Amino acid sequence: MIAPDRIRSIRRATITLVVAALLYEAVARTGYFPQALMPTLPQVGSTLLASLLDGTMLTHAAATMYRVMIGLGLAVAVGLPLGILMARWKPIENFCMPLVSALMPIPSLAWVPVFILWFGLGNTVAILIVFYAALFPMLLNTWSGVRAVNPLWLRAAGAMGANERALFWKVMVPGASPFIITGLRQAFLRAWIAVIGAEFLAASDFGLGWVIFDAKEFLNTDMMLASLVVIGGIGFLFERLVFGSIEKATVQRWGMVRTVKG
Amino acid sequence: MLRSRAKRGVSKHGAASSFETRPSPLLRMRRREVVDREGFALLSGMADVTANVIDAPAAPRAESRLHVLWRNAFPFIVVFGLWEIVARAGIFPPKLFPSLVTVAQALVDLTISGILPHHVFDTVLRLLAGFFLASVFGVALGILMGRSRRMEDVFLPLVSIMAPIPGLAYAPLFLLWFGLGNKSAVLLVAFVSSFSVIFNTWTGVKAVKEIWVRSAQAMGADDRRLFIKVIIPGALPYILTGLRLGLAQAWRILVGIEMLAAVPWGLGWMIFGAREFLNTDVMLAGVVVIGVIGLALEKLVFQKIEQYTVMRWGMLT
């Protein structure tokens, strides 16, 4: 029953995108704005292709991914255990929560100048900024996830003779998993935003953010737009493919989220 | 959906935070599904995080006020104490790792000389201008997309393509197109924060129960009254969530863009400029002020708005 609707939506979406592209192209070709500021789409496309083929774009993307992955990994390594501890032991929650509430409203980018002074330009700053940005979503979602585990399940498992370890692995982890996965997703999104900003400001020599910023100096608008496409593409890919499949492999398989599509 | 929010609303305002008043996982999950339907859990999911932070200090009633105060202050005393010890021990150069007294001194000096208030004023003005543009544009577009299938098909692809790109990545483009300074900063803030407003408004309008619309129509409501009396109040919890997320995003992006756009005044610029002169105390004072403003926006502005509109109209409780 969805099918004809879907097809119509896809058709309209395609039309919209084509029309938008044509409009852009038309404005770019009239020469109303300088060519350097508003390159035509074929120009952007060829720049993208060239930079992909000669490997520069891949190097930059790899450098950015490296920073994101290390920072995100650290955030998970700290946020996940701390979140669980906070949810299970009241004193830890009492100690950490005020600090988290105070640090959380500070945008990660505000720390960039401070970190630059402390650690110098380069990878360390970018990784730390990513860590800072990704930590809070991870921590808070784990915390609320563990707290939201139905006490009935815990009691039921306890009554059926589950020991602490089994209780943890068989009940609490699956029970909190929808929240943890959501936290991971948000953490990645935040990390992805933060890394671009950190690369702008803590100018190292590699990274997609640096490419955009560097291209600005030379008015290479086509290069900027090409990197934007790559940045958006990677973000989209991660969101849809990586997290989508993680969710399928864990949460949905464990039956924690009912699939309501149909 | 509304029920789960209702429960959250209760604990948010400090009625109690025992396990029973917390939304059951099933309710919360149901809520999540609604949001996840279109795959925008990312954007909307952040509401959980901000809400939780507000939840956090809500203490059981039995505790006395003084006790709560002490419990919340204790971690800060420990951290500040550690900081002070490290700073005074001289492990790091004091220029880079100033003692808290120096930071406080810088804060007071800057405030008295009028420099800090000027920075704050300009930053807040920029934030409000950008956020105002984003909310007007975002709510209007979101409602259009929610009510008209055609508009949804036209705009959703465009919005979904532009939204996943980190906001700051657009910054150099905006700087090239609109020049350094205020115009780019405000426009970028508006552009970036409008996405979560659009998505949430759109979801909210679509989530208005069909039966409410039909019963209003059956009782003879015309289009205008249907819109004002049913659709707007029905979608309001989502719209407010969107605005709140938008404001948080605007705040985050504004600090970044102020560092890049070479604006003459602004907190972002203040801390970035202080780096040149190794004024770590000024930088840390700036970070503190940024945090305080961020917290104030969340606590004072949005909680109040929510209380006055959504709660009063009975959409949450």
Image (cartoon, coloured by chain):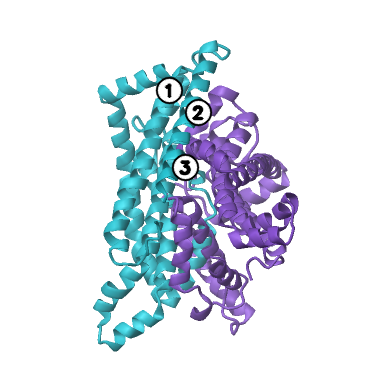
The C terminus of chain B sits in image quarter: bottom right
Q: Residues within 10 Å of mark 2 (few under 14, many from 20)?
A: many
Using the numbered discs, state the Cα–Cα distance from disc 3 to disc 2 in whole angstroms.
18 Å
Vertical placement of B19 versus A188: above or below?
Answer: below
- x, y percentage for residue A121? 39, 36
Q: Write down the residue under mark 1.
A: A215
Query: Numbered disc 3: what chain?
Result: A
Q: Write down the residue under mark 3.
A: A112
Amino acid identity at mark 3:
Val
Mark in the foreground, 3 or 2: 2
Amino acid identity at mark 1:
Ala
- x, y percentage for residue B84? 49, 59
Residue B288 seen: no
Using the numbered discs, state the Cα–Cα distance from disc 3 to disc 1 in whole angstroms.
21 Å
Vertical placement of A165 versus A209: above or below?
Answer: below
- x, y percentage for residue B174? 55, 28
Whether pointer 1 and pointer 2 mark residues with C-beta atoms closer than 8 Å, the reply is yes
Callout 3: SS = helix
Q: Write down the residue under mark 2.
A: B172
Chain A: give its colour.
cyan
Q: Nearer the viewer, residue B119 or B100?
A: B119
Query: Numbered disc 1: what chain?
Result: A
Amino acid identity at mark 2:
Pro
Using the numbered discs, state the Cα–Cα distance from disc 1 to disc 2 in whole angstroms.
9 Å
